[in-house]
Image (tube, rainbow, N blue to C red):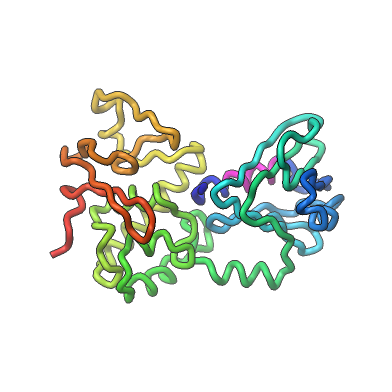
Amino acid sequence: MPEGHTIHRLAAEHQLMFGGRPVSASSPQGRFAGGAAVLDGRVLADADAHGKHLLLGFGDDRVLHVHLGIYGKYMFGTGPAPVPVGVVRLRLEGAGGYADLRGPNTCEVLEPGEVKLLRDRLGPDPLRADADPEVAWRRIGRSRTPVGVLLMDQSVVAGPGNIYRAEVLFRQGVDPRLPGRRLAREQWVGIWADLVVLMADGVRAGRIDTVRPEHTPEAMGRPPRVDGHGGEVYVYRRAGQPCLVCGTAVAAGELAGRNLFWCPGCQPPAG
């Protein structure tokens, strides 16, 4: 599932291609025909993201809400849109080009009150200027749940997925199995600040890179990482490989049904 930086990039791409101009909306697949008819011909007023949720606002306060889920994908193109290929849930077309949406978990038109309900159930997003990390800390600081689970809970922190979860906890030296209520406040401050920087870097680069300058392939004289997820990382999907910092073999396990990666040397269990 795409992590939050990807959704913010999608919002920016929609704004650049369609912002302030009327769009043509259709559902070649047919499953979103009613919603497309509501949006057809309207002006895209703003494109926003909150965590993993894309929110496209139109001039009459209607909002297109898209959650890609595991299988959802967008394809953008310039010039006249070609005949749809495959199962296209929604096609938006404008003077600058087109956007095809396939296989989303959610694609719906929301009223203003429904948008508020959605936002209210999401935690603060490190990529949003209006985010308040204290909201997340109030839940984390009193929870018995492991911090590695809490960081994946979108109602606690909106946006991070498995990669950012693994990497930020490594960078801050926190055992992902540590109960939230045993996390020190200064550790949370460091985690949040790191997420803000790392995820903003992800928006700019279009991929997740988390290693510090001294641990890049060039600095260490090692081969670049080759992985479908791209980017240079410390522990994510590096099980059994030596830690780039201490040399300990990266450990792997499962936590709340999700793959977990950490370094036993750099992230020792709390005493």
Residue at horizontal 27%, vertical 41%?
Answer: 239
Left or right of residue 170, residue 163 in this image = right
Is 220 part of what is drawn in magenta?
no
Which residue extends farthest bottom?
142
Q: Position of residue 73 (x, y in %)?
A: 62, 42
Left or right of residue 17, residue 211 in this image = left
Is 11 part of what is drawn in magenta?
yes
Q: Quadrant of residue 225?
A: top left
Where's the C terminus, which quadrant?
Answer: bottom left
Q: Position of residue 94 (x, y in %)?
A: 80, 40
Q: Position of residue 63 (x, y in %)?
A: 72, 60
- Looking at the magenta stretch, what is its main secondary structure? helix
Instruction: Note whether 202 is above or below 162 in the view shown.
Output: above
Residue at horizontal 32%, vertical 51%?
Answer: 260
Q: For this rendering, which residue is in front, 164 or 68?
A: 68
Residue at horizontal 37%, vertical 55%?
Answer: 193
Instruction: Note whether 116 is above or below 129 in the view shown.
Output: below
Left or right of residue 90, residue 106 in this image = left
Q: Position of residue 210 (x, y in %)?
A: 36, 41
Instruction: Note whether 153 is above or below 246 in the view shown.
Output: below
**Range covered by the magenta-colored residues:** 9-16
* Count of marks placed on residues: 0
Residue at horizontal 45%, vertical 42%?
Answer: 201
